[in-house]
Amino acid sequence: MKKLLVIFFMATFFSDAIFFAQEHSPQKFEFKYKKGDSYRILSTVNEDVFVNNELNHNAEILNRISVRVTDVDENGDGVHEANFMTSENSTGAAGGIFSYGEDYESVFSRDAFGKYKIGDEYFMPVVRDVPIFPDKEISVGEKWSAQGHEAHDLRRTFGIKTPFKIPFTAEYEYLGIEKNDEEKILHKFSCKYKMEYSSQDLPAEYLNLEFSLDVPVRTVGFSNQTIFWDSEKGYIDHYIEDFKIMIQSSYGNVFLFQGTAHAEVTDFVRTADEQNVNSVLEKIEDLGISDVSVSATEKGLTLSVENIQFMPDSDILLESEKIKLQKIAQILNAYPENDLLIVGHTALRGTQKEQMELSEMRSRAVADYLIKNKVRDKYHIFTKGMGGSSPIGDNRTEAGRAKNRRVEITIMDK
């Protein structure tokens, strides 16, 4: 017993000594890119929107970014292929499930210190060149500054065909290190910047247009971020932010957006390969699940649950289908780091609008059941309704219509 206590106290002593040494030793921070690396960034924004000093609505915005490093050059610059998706729940939908929003593809490179190279055909990411690290060792308490910019999409509002870039100077400070819940050592930084632009800063194509609508003439804002850095991986572990943006329009209206954000960065397992398809098929057979097919699709590994049973013309799952979903949950739980996309389909019955509404309701019912059974929380599961637009069976036969009444559950790779 005494020997075990000695070992325990020695281990604790050496752990604390390593922590102390890292906290007081200058560090050099660099992004570490490896070809084939895949990761996902999930940011949640809680925002209050005011119009002319009155609260208009609250919004919870979910941004999902999946990234794959496709190449690393001799200088250590990593080429990234990324998919961006944004979904929003406004007032009245608190606690609701997030629908899968519009996808944006982007390709960019980033050097070891954080600087982007990205073409004007890409509108994502919005915030660029944050963080930027100096090419030297830095100590706790040391400060530095670096240029960055935000790139905004004004195509729909103003017809500007390239990202509208707002430059800023970010002020950084190395705050030290701390341990997370898993006892992993993370380095902590603050990043603060302010931005301001007015109508005279806009590109010429904006100034030459004739507008009859209310348009922005002045925008000011700030962002205060705390970034937690994983030196072992050479990337951000997570960050938190508070922000405020005020927009004044040509008609004298004032729009204020303020809130907080949190983002997590995680690796995830790529599922869409032949080995995983065969493995899941074997599991389905072992569990005795009927009417389920498996395929590798563009977004990941998809389980198509055909002839899924609800109460007539409703989104109320029958008990038999709940049992089936409980079995499917055992498969989904084998990929805990991957988000889920639930897509509902209907047969060609009723109007297109009715088909779409019913498919959306049923996809949400399946997602809600999985959330209640703790397969995923609401921030890691998305829904989408397709109505009767993607049939896999002949709608002229009952057997075909049964195939078309399906829910597809995708273990997402992107």
Image: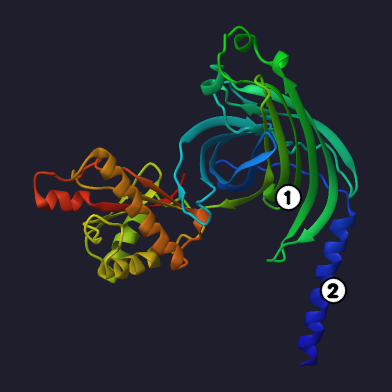
Instruction: Residue under label 2, please give it.
Output: 13
Can you say whether 163 is above or below 375 in the image? above
Whether residue 17 is visible = yes
User: What is the residue that sits farthest to the left in this orientation?
Assistant: 397
What percent of the width, then of the height, locates residue 356? 30, 43
In the figure, residue 303 lies in which quadrant?
bottom left
Whether residue 129 is visible = no
Q: Which mark is residue 342?
A: none
Q: Residues within 10 Å of mark 2 (few under 14, many from 20)?
A: few
What percent of the width, then of the height, locates residue 238? 67, 51
Q: Residues within 10 Å of mark 1 (few under 14, many from 20)?
A: many
Judged left or right of residue 153, residue 307 is left
Judged left or right of residue 266, residue 327 is left
Q: Secondary structure at mark 2?
A: helix
- Which of the pair 390/266 is nearer the observer? 390
Q: Residue at x 82, y 77 (%)?
A: 10
Q: Amino acid at mark 2?
A: Phe
Q: CA distance from mark 2 to mark 1?
A: 24 Å
Q: Residue at x 60, y 22 (%)?
A: 163
- Which of the pair 191/38 is nearer the observer? 191
Instruction: Residue under label 1, please give it.
Output: 229
Number of the front mark, 2 or 1: 1
Judged left or right of residue 62, residue 260 is right
Q: Residue at x 44, y 44 (%)?
A: 100
